[in-house]
Amino acid sequence: MSNASPLPLLDPDVAPCCPPLTERPLTAEEAVRTAAMFKALGDPVRLRLFSAVASHENGEACVCDISDVGVSQPTVSHHLKKLKEAGLLTSERRGTWVYYRVEPSVLAAMGHILGRYAAA
């Protein structure tokens, strides 16, 4: 029997961090935030972990469900930490397991940043 409940969703009306790339040049601050987000996803293992969490049922995944990406558990933990530091994931400990969730505003922000080319 489990008393686990899904992580709460963030406000879906959260404004994205940056304007579309086609709207105007990014400010230095916007470029730093955007680069950190895309840099975190630039590693194939991190991208697989991010995808595993994002595509998992209810948009959250236990670390026990996403650790089979071809690297050791300490390496998985390292990559998940980097994704959290970049603001791409949140986590919650439930008993002995940690559950990860993609920040809802992140996917919207990434699509927004890419602008009209995201739909092409």
Image (cartoon, helix red, strand yellow):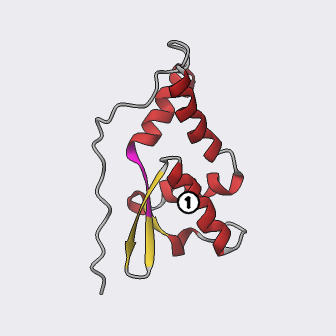
Q: Which residue is mark 1?
A: 81
What kind of element bears circle 1?
helix
Q: Of all residues shown, which one is farthest toward the top? A: 24
Relative to 2, is 70 above or below? above
Secondary structure mainly formed by the magenta segment: strand
User: Type of residue at label 1?
Assistant: Lys
In the image, residue 103 lies in the stretch drawn in magenta: yes
* Number of residue marks: 1
Is 4 placed above or below 53 here? below
**Magenta residues, start to end:** 100-104
Residue drawn at x 60%, y 34% is: 35
Where residue 104 sits in the image (x, y, percent)? Answer: 39, 45
Question: Quarter holding the N terminus?
Answer: bottom left
Q: Quadrant of residue 11?
A: top left
Indicate whether residue 30 is drawn in magenta.
Answer: no
96 displayed left or right of 65? left
